[in-house]
Image: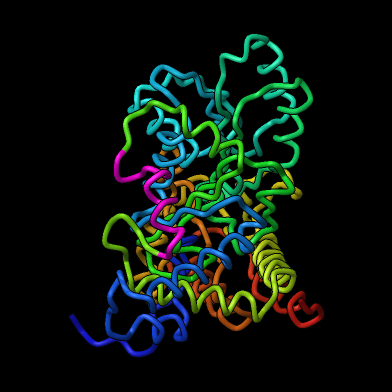
Amino acid sequence: MSFRSGRHFLQLPGPTNVPDRVLRAMDRPTIDHRGSEFADLVQGILRDLAETFGGAEHVFIYPASASGAWEAALVNTLSPGDRVLACVNGFFADKWRAVAERLGLDVEVLEGEWRRAVDPDALRTRLERDPDAAIKAVMVVHNETSTGITTPVPQIRGAIDAVGHGALLMVDAVSSLASLPYRHRAWNVDVTVAGSQKGLMLPPGLSFTAVSPRALELHRAARLPRAYWDWSSLLEFNANGFFPYTPATNLLFGLREALAMLHEEGSERTIARHHRLAEATRRAVGGWRLDLYGMLAEELSDTVTAVLMPEGSDAEAFRRTVLDRFDMSLGTGLGPLKGRVVRIGHLGDFNDLMLLGTLAGIEMGLRCTDVPFASGGIQAAMDYLSTTRE
């Protein structure tokens, strides 16, 4: 393989670029995970994580991808045969649905349009037809990474509350945490699922479940089999700063540094930065006369932009060309969107010049693959970025 100068542009919607500060924080000897130094590390992280989630009774940390946290959310709160309502409006919502089915739960699907957010009215209508509260949990993806669509969680909570339904609200915040507004406590979410490799700016390998007091209460009566994922064991060990298994110590060093960086920037500025870069990306797509996959402006994600390629253009051929020619990775289309959609990640450790380099690589790729487009995209993004600030 020949040498390639410069840094690889990793413009996926996750894993994201890992900041040098986080890399340096992880580059240190592993410490005793039963010692006092480690206990201090974990207790500080748990406090800061609860704040990052927007308040939570407790945040559980697993050495696993976010798929593990999906399972942890379900097995800790539900019993065999319980009915759950999976709101499916994208690839990852459907994958979470599949996890619930494999665990033996009675899964009902509330089908949604993939180009739209989950419909609160449709949810309310379904729950109104469940007077006996057979549905024990509602599963929603806050920011659907496959489509670039954000669902307003407060409206989902409102739909549940409007009919006085007792279902738990479970939210996947994998590609929204620490990038978009998220308020676990204020929005009355029962379980929030997240991962390390997106807005938290870490490598893959850590996942989280933030829980409400009600979720913890129901956990005590839940009967789905669990061992590794069990909240009870974690609560017992976490109280003293430890884990019931060998933790991913060096990733925890990185997590502490990432949380410090987020604190230094401040959540309002972090959210504003993501919105500004997302808007510049959308203006670039409009300047190219290409179509966004999302149908409504107010539902478009500020962490990932999904671009619908023109009819007759192969999104995968375009992605391969961009990688081969310009050493830049863009997100693939997933499931039925394979070959139709290219996803641009703009979250985590990311700034104006990194975005403009990304957009330049995309425009060169469009030229190289003969995708029909207009040439005003980069200028539209530059005009916006040069006249706005976070």
Q: Quadrant of the C terminus?
A: bottom right
* Residue 372 higher or lower than 232, as above or below: below
Residue 47, given in percent of the width and then of the height, sits at 57, 65
Vertical arrangement, residue 130 with respect to residue 237, above or below = above
Q: Which residue sits at x=40%, y=61%?
A: 319
- Nearest the viewer among 124 and 371 is 124
In the rendered image, residue 316, in percent from the top left (x then y), is placed at 38, 54
Q: Residue at x 69, y 23 (%)?
A: 122
Q: Is residue 48 left or right of residue 253?
A: right
The relative height of residue 371 versus residue 67 in the rendered view (above or below) is below
**Image position of 50 (left or right of 206):** right
State the count of labels: 0
Does 51 appear in magenta?
A: no
Residue found at x 41% / y 84%: 25
Which quarter of the picture shows residue 383?
bottom right
Q: Using the image, determine if residue 33 lies above or below residue 337.
A: below
Q: Is residue 27 visible?
A: yes
Front residue of 76 and 27: 76
Instruction: Identify the residue at the far right of this view.
Output: 387
Q: Quadrant where the N terminus lies?
A: bottom left
Magenta-colored stretch includes residue 237: yes
**Where residue 213 sits: x, y (%)?**
61, 41
Query: Could you say which is closer to the camera, residue 108 or residue 208?
Result: 208
Image coords of residue 250 (percent x, y): 34, 75
Residue at the limit of the structure toward the left, as seen here: 1
- Is residue 308 visible to us here? no
Residue at 70%, 66% in the rendered image: 271
Q: Residue furthest bottom?
A: 5
Specify start and end residues of the magenta stretch as a single range: 227-241
